[in-house]
Image (cartoon, helix red, strand yellow):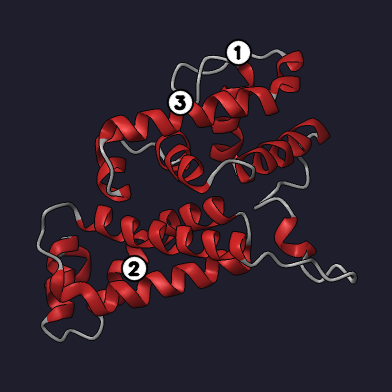
Amino acid sequence: MTDSSRSDAELLRAHVDGDQYAFAELFHRHRDRLWAVALRTLADREEAADALQDALLSAHRAAARFRGDSAVTTWLHRIVVNACLDRARRRQAHPTVPLPDGSRAESDRPIAAEPAAPAVDHDTALDVRQALSQLPEEQRAALILVDVQGYPVAEVAVILGVAEGTVKSRCARGRAKLAVVLGHLRAGGGNPRSGDRVGTSTAQARTAKVEEEK
């Protein structure tokens, strides 16, 4: 049976049984979304890479304890989010000061920004990223999973290990704060798509749109 024909659960079980390639294939399938969650949660490429590496090592070692109570992807996202939140809390407890030579400037640049994009879109992306980084990490994680990644509230509740009502409450509080911080974007007008999840205001809709287009 080829890796492409095996389900996530089958790959994880094969890894536990000693298949040295199974976990690599599992990670390859989901790395883009896992990386996106880590990067947007921490807003720092170096921190996100370290958190993702920590998470994958944890998943690699803990695979035998997976009981199938949720989808493998949900399990992986839970481990990644927890690794990111742990790093965010440590960063809050021990903040670092950027070096004067700007050696960390690379991590502050927009992710996959398109050189040909209009300046207003570039500025909006920066505004949105900065606004998200100002949210408490629990609210930021919930918003990224629900509004940016598009996961159902029920699945996000499993990923974060909280009740669905808690996810909804965190999202609502986070959206309210974003609406205030990004209120200046309303002056630009625009018609948010019906599929945008962040909210009904232009500022909130642009949060999802900017992240989707990166």
User: Spatial distance from mark 3 to mark 2, Cα to Cα?
Assistant: 32 Å
Residue 158 % position (x, y): 25, 46
Mark 3 vs 2, N-terminal side: 2
Tell me the residue at 68%/64% (across/down).
95
Mark 1 vs 3, N-terminal side: 3
Q: Secondary structure at mark 1?
A: loop
Query: So how many labels did they put on this image?
Result: 3
Q: Which image quarter: residue 46?
A: bottom right
Judge from the rendering whether residue 42 lies leftward or rightward of residue 189; answer left or right.
left
Q: Which residue is mark 1?
A: 191
Query: Is 210 situated above or below 27?
Result: above
Q: Secondary structure at mark 2?
A: helix
Q: The N terminus is located in which quarter? A: bottom left
Tell me the residue at 73%/56% (across/down).
108
Q: Which residue is mark 3?
A: 172
- The numbered mark at residue 85 is none
Do labels 1 and 3 touch, CB within 8 Å? no
Residue 192 % position (x, y): 56, 17
Judge by depth and name the residue closer to the eye, 180 or 72. Answer: 180
- The numbered mark at residue 27 is 2
Q: Is residue 157 visible?
A: yes
Q: Residue placed farthest to the right in the image?
A: 101
Q: Secondary structure at mark 3?
A: helix
Of marks 1 and 3, the one in the foreground = 3
Tell me the residue at 63%/60% (across/down).
44
